[in-house]
Image: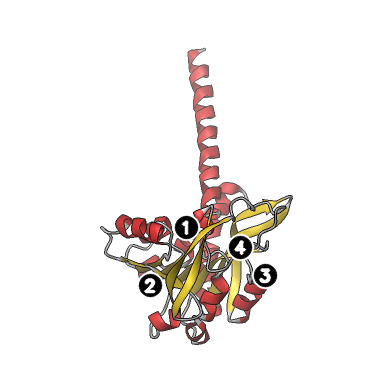
Amino acid sequence: MLNKFKIIIRILIYKFGLEIHKKSLLNQIDDPFFVLSKLLDGQKIKLIVDGGASIGDTSARFSSLFPHAVIHAFEPFPKFYNILKKNCSRNLLIKPHDNALSDTNGQKILNINKSEGTNSLLKTKLDKNHHHHDLLTPVGSVEVKTITLDELFPNAIIDILKLDLQGGEFDALIGAKELISNHKINSILCEIIFDKHYQSQKNGTELLSFIESNGFSLFNFYQCNYHQGKLIQADALFFHKSTQTLINKNADKYFMQFSKYLNLS
């Protein structure tokens, strides 16, 4: 009787362990940073741009996944920038900048909102019925320095360009038009807002079309946010067509292993 009980316990532990493993694998598939580390050759990644770095969490994640890469982290909001600078002070490969990535070099007004994570160079589009109305309520502003990627990296190849600029992604890409036209950006991880949060904000489909029209292919959406069943925001991962052979090869290898465990094949 005792032996049967032990066998049952072992079976339950085994099954429970498999379920945990499956859940872990599914979480990895839905993690764009982890997917990037699998689809790109991590040892060869030299330059990453983290646009909208906040306090440095994403830069730290990139650094852990791509330990040989130099990461330029841009955060114009003074409060966040000071924390970013402190958080990455021991990692010499993370370079903090207090500039906002944009389409011009100079100064612009950064609009500060009640939820500081929604701060933007664009003014909020206030509507009392908007589901994020409270978060987007303006509480102040500050003048910040702006710079273009073309100005900063005229001769470099950016392996990963991450943009989380609260509606300012399109302007940042305009500021990288030379890099883009010369095929010097290999991948883009970009926040896409389909819902109108800010004045002068490009529609999400316009931003998608612009990126794809410049030689990039959409790989997948991550961290999707919905409201009343409608997709309002997501992180979109793109790869330049010049990387497609490598991406397809690694995707086949990577997802084949996942299919084995998740019974997706």
The disc placed on residue 47 is 2
The type of residue carrying mark 2 is Leu
In percent of width and height, residue 101 lies at 46, 73
In percent of width and height, residue 122 lies at 57, 68
Give neighbour class at mark 4: few <14, some 14-19, many 20+ (Cα, 10 Å): many
Give neighbour class at mark 1: few <14, some 14-19, many 20+ (Cα, 10 Å): some
The type of residue carrying mark 4 is Thr
Residue where numbered disc 3 is placed: 203
Secondary structure under tag 1 reads helix
Residue plotted at (74% across, 50% down): 228
Residue plotted at (38% across, 68% down): 98
The disc placed on residue 245 is none
In percent of width and height, residue 180 lies at 51, 82
* Residue 65 shows up from this direction: no
Separation (CA) of disc 2 from disc 4: 32 Å
Residue where numbered disc 1 is placed: 34
Q: Is 261 drawn above or below residue 127 in the view shown? A: above
Secondary structure under tag 4 reads loop
Q: Nearer the viewer, residue 89 or 136?
A: 136
